[in-house]
Image (cartoon, grey):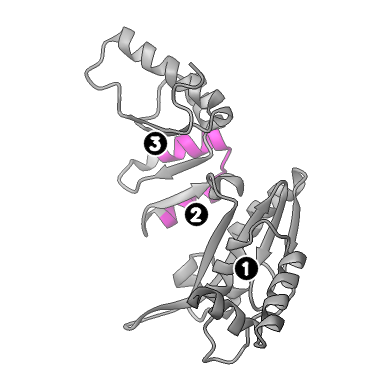
Amino acid sequence: MEELFSDSVILFDDYQEGMTGGEIKLVEFFRDFYLTTGRHTRTSMILCHHISNDREKTKMIMTETSNIVLFSKSTTKSREYLLKTYYGFDKGQIAEVEKRMKAKDRWVSKSIDSLFGKNNAIILFYPGKKSKKGLTGHYTCLIKIGDEYHYYDSYGDFIDKPKQYSKQRNALYNEPGRKNSLIALLRKAQKEGAVIDYSHYKHQSEHPLVATCGRHCLTRCMRSDLTNDQYDGFITACAKKWKTDKDGAVSAIWNM
């Protein structure tokens, strides 16, 4: 049975509607089985239904779930019960969630691993300014190699530093003060034994007309098999071979 849904996504969408007690028990047997064993067969699950009144069943689901999505149309009391009972949120944390829920639906992640899914590289976009012409910002990326996380910014900056450049930080990020969710997730991973590294190599010119951060990140993700130090050696060799700077090197790679 383990291989029945290997390399698959199973969707449980409000399945209790119109089903007999026996049918519900059978579906929940499969649900619980793949919740606890799915990681071994690369089976993912999307579970969409109301929180069960059975506290033990709900606790098991919450423990095995890597991400939860909270919808703004759900009742405040149900969200408060969920966050307080199963995630241990205090009143201040719940109030912060409610504040954000008024803005839009949000993806809430409990761990840095859940951001990657089946990939070992993700691109992070930092909006800097919103105007009638659109949204401008800066791209960085995060690479996972085993139990190591390699943060890459083509300017050679610290993790999440692009937020400091934003003139509309509170409005764009809804993270007033020094609160920082990405760093919190990385610190949690570090406490669990992970190694956190950031690239201090300056690969991109700071000239305002040079906008190559996206190409730098795409190239870095393409070579997600390399550590930050190894990647610097790679892009430096490319620039030397083609007799250009590193901005020219990544541009050449994506213009081939």
Q: Amino acid at mark 3?
A: Ser
Inter-mark Cα distance, 2 to 1 = 21 Å
Q: Amino acid at mark 1?
A: Asp
User: Who's the residue at 77% across and 67% down the image?
Assistant: 229
Q: Is residue 149 above or below residue 174?
A: above
Please tell me whether mark 3 or mark 1 is closer to you in this view.
1
Q: Is residue 228 left or right of residue 52?
A: right
| Mark nearer the N terminus (2 vs 3) | 3
The quadrant in which residue 232 appears is bottom right
Q: In this rendering, would 7 be left or right of 178?
A: left
Label ID, residue 160: 1
| Residue 102 among magenta residues | no
Task: Residue 70: give x, y in percent of width and height.
Answer: 40, 44
Q: Which element type, helix, strand or loop, lies under badge 3?
A: helix
80 drawn magenta = yes
**x 53%, y 39%: residue:** 66
What is the x, y in percent for residue 201? Answer: 73, 76
Residue beneath disc 3: 78
Determine whether label 2 and label 1 are within 8 Å by CB: no
Residue 195 to residue 255: above or below: above
Eye-nearest disc, 2 or 1: 1
- What residue sits right under mark 2 in the picture? 96
- Sequence-wise, the earlier of marks 2 and 1 is 2
Residue displayed at 48% across by 25% down: 58
Q: Which of disc 1 and disc 3 is earlier in sequence?
A: 3
Q: CA distance from mark 3 to mark 1?
A: 33 Å
